[in-house]
Amino acid sequence: MTEPASATTASGPAASGPALAVIGAGPAGLAAAVAAAARGLRVVLVDSAADAGGQFYRQPAATLGARRPWALHHQWRAWERLRAALTAQITAGRIRHLADHHVWCVERESGSGFAVHALLGPEQRDSVAVRAAGVVLATGGYEKVLPFPGWTLPGVITAGGAQAVLKGSLALPPGRTAVVAGTGPLLLPVATGLAAAGARVAALVDSVDPRALLRQAGALAGQPAKLVEGAGFAARLAFHRVPVMARHTVLRAHGEERLTAVTVAALGAGGRPVSGTERRLACDTLAVGHGLLPHTDLAEGLGCGPDGPAVRVDDEQRTDVPGVWAAGEATGIGGAALALAEGHIAGRSAAARLRGDVPDARGWSAAARSRSRLREFFAALDAGYVPPGGWAERITDDTVLCRCEEVTASAVREAAGPLGAGDLRTVKLLTRAGMGWCQGRMCAPGVAGVAGCGATPGRRLLARPVPLGALAAEPTEPQ
């Protein structure tokens, strides 16, 4: 997938056409920004991180003086091409990159424009408004973690959190002996990354049944590069002598002040633990995750229609809100290559539509073919990677489901049982689960599972907590 890098060939004066706000500087956002800027739009790239790249291309701080920053990455050459394209467009004055800008709301203004409201810097007290004729939502995804007894102990972190520490600080998470557990393809790079960085990985515990993946072999074979990538991870696991416990799950994390061990068990029929197969593994770090979920808060606030848990888009990556495009994990989890393809299409479509032209889809035909193949591949992967059955039944009543508000499983069960709550919103009103700082991003799957209701997305006006002073103040333009 090379389309985004081709935009580096554009030359000429700084763009003077309509402004496009691209929210998110991961693969999808960068590809969209570069493609749109190369075709005459003024682009404002808004991102909460200090540097472009997102989670996938997360870079160590320059002060660390990393000698081999590519060591913890794959697809590094794709990143170098994308970074060069971005730098060229910024130098030419076509892209303005606003780092450390945390977007909390996108609102449609009178007429056809939009105001992108963002809090500034680490303290996130002051707010600015970026005005644009169109918006590309490239907001990425966030991790899904299914709770279990002991999951709130210090030393238990998300799989993506462990990867972020490795990539961003070139350091191991606290502890020297790790277990990587859950399900999903993210576990492979996390386990190999920890092992390569010097941790002793006691086990990779994956609840997936290999036979489920074999049943998807036909669709998976359509992406041989992905299969080679997976084989490479498997070889590195073997090199570092990491035991792989397929069709197993973590039942409980143990410890008083911090994590000291986990109990795992084999899964049998229906994905339920087999009695007598319990095994205790000593560790001081547990990196756990059960896949990713699309980050759709801003899309929901704008009224964009859903496609399951993701944002619904057409063949041009347009949402059903005029002037709003979406690309990358927000439209469905599919990795960096799919995000690059979707971002490129979104950027080219926006460049034409905002100028009043009808885009020529032949210009992104290669990206469209890549998008189609990768969507099919990841749909098959999703069908194979499923959480273990009956996980909610095994959560003890004293297990905290919502950390922010300290809501236990017993409170959620009471709300869904005697109190009659039949949906996630009612459970939230009765228990305060999901009313804390993360607004349910961490706990919603667990709360919904224990309550026995669907984890339906809710429309939020604000995508993150905002100081009252920022709401009351007249928004200013970014400096």
Image (tube, grey):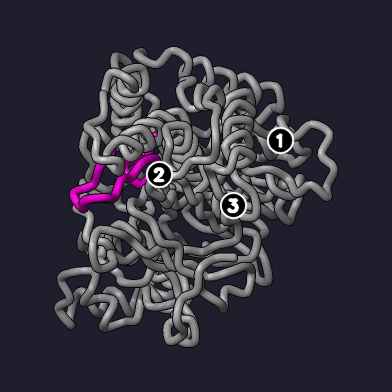
Image quadrant where residue 465 sits: bottom left
Q: Earlier in the sequence, mark 1 or mark 2?
A: 2
> Which mark identifies residue 195?
1
Does residue 319 belong to the magenta stretch?
yes
**Residue 256 image position (x, y, % from top left):** 65, 70
Mark 2 or 3 closer to N-term? 2
The answer to which of 226 and 465 lies nearer the viewer is: 465
Rendered position, 216 above or below 122: above
Residue 65 as seen in the image, left or right of residue 175: right
Q: What residue span does the magenta drawing correspond to?
A: 317-335
Question: At label 2, which amino acid type do we have?
Answer: Gly
Q: Where residue 381 sits in the image (x, y, percent)?
A: 35, 29
Marks 3 and 1, Cα distance to the nearest angstrom?
15 Å
Residue under the point 31% across and 66% down: 107
> Tag on residue 154?
none
Q: Residue at x 35, y 37 (%)?
A: 351
Residue sitting nearer the eye, 373 or 47:
47
User: How busy is the neighbourhood of tag 1: few (under 14 within 10 Å), some, or many (20 plus)?
Assistant: many
Q: Are marks 3 and 1 in contact (CB under 8 Å)?
A: no
- The answer to whether residue 169 is left or right of residue 438 is right
> For residue 8, which quarter of the picture?
top right
On the picture, is 19 further left or further right than 362?
right
* Residue found at x 25% / y 66%: 459
Q: Position of residue 78 (x, y in %)?
A: 57, 25
Q: Would residue 388 appear left or right of 405 to someone viewing this image?
A: left
Residue matched to label 2: 17
Other residues around mark 3 within 10 Å, as few (<14) / some (14–19) / many (≥20): some
Query: What amino acid is labelled 1 in the image?
Result: Ala
Mark 3, residue position = 161
Q: Secondary structure at mark 1?
A: helix
